[in-house]
Amino acid sequence: MLEAYRKHVAERAAEGVVPKPLDAHQVAELIELVKNPPAGEEEFILDLLENRIPPGVDEAAYVKAGFLDAVAKGEATSPILSAARAVELLGTMQGGYNIEPLIAQLDNDVQAPLAVKALSNTLLMFDAYHDVVEKMQAGNAHAKQVVESWANAEWFLSRPKLADKVTLTVFKVTGETNTDDLSPAPDAWSRPDIPLHALAMLKNARDGIVPDEAGVKGPINEIEALKQKGHPLVYVGDVVGTGSSRKSATNSVLWFMGDDIPFVPNKRAGGFCLGGKIAPIFFNTMEDAGALPIELDVSKMNMGDVIDIYPYEGVVKLHGSDEVISEFKLKTDVLLDEVRAGGRIPLIIGRGLTDRARETLGLPASDVFVRPQDVADSGKGYTLAQKMVGKACGVAGVRPGQYCEPKMTSVGSQDTTGPMTRDELKDLACLGFSADLTMQSFCHTAAYPKPVDVNTHHTLPDFIMNRGGVSLRPGDGVIHSWLNRMLLPDTVGTGGDSHTRFPIGISFPAGSGLVAFAAATGVMPLDMPESILVRFKGEMQPGITLRDLVHAIPHKAIEMGLLTVEKKGKINAFSGRILEIEGLEKLKVEQAFELSDASAERSAAGCTIKLDKEPIIEYLNSNIVMLKWMIAEGYGDRRTIERRIAAMEEWLANPELMAADADAEYAEVIEIDLNEIKEPILCAPNDPDDAVLLSQVKDTQIDEVFVGSCMTNIGHFRATGKMLDKFAKTLPTRLWIAPPTKMDRDQLTEEGYYAIFGRVGARIEIPGCSLCMGNQARVAEGATVVSTSTRNFPNRLGTGANVYLASAELAAVAALLGRLPSVEEYQEYAKEIDATAADTYRYLNFDQIDSYTQKAGEVIFQSAV
């Protein structure tokens, strides 16, 4: 075992990374060595046992905890591991399999003091809390010590406060850093392996950044050289963390700029991140990791500068001087407690444990923590989002700035963040979900899986379903197109993908750590954001599509001075706020998602869309049949699916919808007159904020066209197919087709559209994300592309690609012409689409499709819901 492990260490060292943590099989072999250590290997073997095994409910942790328990009880022995040391090591495992053995040691007077110390610093107690209290109430003095320690918040006070002054070396990346830069999509397969994945951070050359190997390995040599100045590094940028919700971006930054976590292999926490603007999801993932994110003016900070941050004073000075180069105010004073606790999630769990213990002991609330402050009631009405979050918190509404923990009714996870979410769930010692519905998809890796993806496809479904979650299958399609069909009106949820943007209800997308917390506990921490109202009025003009309305929002915001394309001194009024959309109440829910989905590109915290009851009733009736069909097809967890069907039926029996109050307050109001939108609006390369009119970019030569992603529905593919059928023999462009779900694929095949796509030479991808994320198939290097995908960051769809975001209808015309048409040309094609619009824009109503209703009709509920 040691020989194989040392070979692995050498192989990883050659790659420039530390070895992987031990797996369950290796731990089992290691335990045999601990029992009978080879001469001269004792120290090395103990180090592996203490420091190279993941904590929580990892399979390796299960083996470790079982052995340590046996040693602590005297059932197993080792010449290098005493019973006392075994108890101490159980105390380093955070929660899960170590809890029961530690509680048992409270009855052992010899080992009990060690167990008291271990449990006093263990936060992930969950129901085992009651076991300790029962022992205390039965007269166990050691158990009482544990409860008193929790009540006194010794777990928190034993950790050092953030220093008054922190000296750091600046690692600055100018312009906008998105999460694709920090955690590139083509390297998504390595995300759970944090040290290896971190090597890809900033691997593409950009202003001021020279990667070690362009396109392969980031500026590691430069990072190491800066560390030679003797101070920790701080990540600094004009705009930081836009785009996807991937916590892997935070993990990569902190691998180079954070601190080791004692007894936790290959993961780091702490550190600092400074940005002129920090995207809200990235800000939150930094919080969750125990880092201190600060928004401030970074214009006077340059690569290699040494600075002193004074977190309590709110100033930054050049090191060793009194020259103030920036000032700031922390988002909330609770941030300092989060840093001290090791992250937002440990603080929430630990603070709750302290409150629980004090209540048990009859003590008043602790004054140790900085508590979130209640926001003064303005006396005005509530917005729709404020009412939805209020409902999830059991109150009428929640004011902006108010801290709350809304109930998570629906939680989504996808496959490039799912393995990280699995690791976070293990760290949280989660063996069952508290969220009402947690769903896992496989839309990002199904088309071209690497061996590590195949392993995920085999292992992650059982992990999710064993905890009561619903697992999709590779090839089923995009997470959002499925999760949307499982939603309940006016409820709150989250998901480990930045495009988890519910068209009914509201969601607050998050990184994998917070998604795991929401799934495990059924709630999510939230500082209620402000809202921006976007109100549409007037009538849609000929040829104008919903995608044009999506792009009309940034176009209008630029006109109003609420948004700038320039990154230095970036203005983005949407960032961190909720986008609330009115004036399009007649939309079908599938159409509404096109608008809510794109709120991710605004860096909005969430989105609501006011819809009439009728489209929602139609949608839920369809979705009930789909969910019953899923049961008939063997999807699980069956009990969770049945429970969701029952909840939908309950709402349909009394279909009431919330609505914003007439005097609700908004940070900004944007009014868009549909009568004034007379030509398509695109987003120019390579920025989803850079909204331009078609007339400004007409005649641009186009090499490739992509029709797919969660921004599309079956109507878009019919429209594309009809135009290709009428006008195309051979295409001057490379056309990609990727329907969002297998249900769309099957219906399009039945209607003959796949035959059309095949005849014109389109490349047809399996249902899923395809080009949109850029982690699998990619467009040609340097290609100019029209895409219906979500975003067009540099290098996302292909290396050096220039990508225009546009409607499927405009994309189809570009595919036919090999260029962007003039407005007049486009309108001629649009007339052809409008002629059969009623047939084209039909949506999947499963309650009207025999192949689904027949199977759904055979389902008999097996559980009491």
Image (cartoon, grey):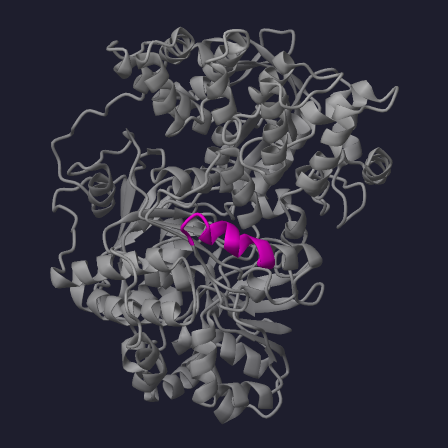
Left or right, 648 with respect to 812, comes to left
Q: Quadrant of the N terminus?
A: top right
- 565 is higher (above) or lower (below) than 132: below
Q: Which residue does the image show at 58% across and 38% down from the upper left?
A: 58
Residue 148 seen in this snapshot: yes
Q: Quadrant of the C terminus?
A: bottom left
As rendered, which of 598 and 45 lies closer to the eye? 45
* Residue 577 locus on image (x, y percent): 35, 41
As rendered, which of 56 and 233 lies closer to the eye? 56
* Residue 597 locus on image (x, y percent): 40, 57
Task: Answer whether residue 527 is magenta in the image.
Answer: no
Q: Which residue does the image show at 63% across and 15% down from the upper left?
A: 83
Left or right, 342 with respect to 358, comes to right
* Residue 486 locus on image (x, y percent): 33, 60
Residue 367: quadrant of the picture: top left
- The boundaries of the magenta stretch are 457-469
Task: Answer whether residue 462 is magenta in the image.
Answer: yes
* Residue 361 locus on image (x, y percent): 28, 11
As rendered, which of 533 and 628 lies closer to the eye? 628
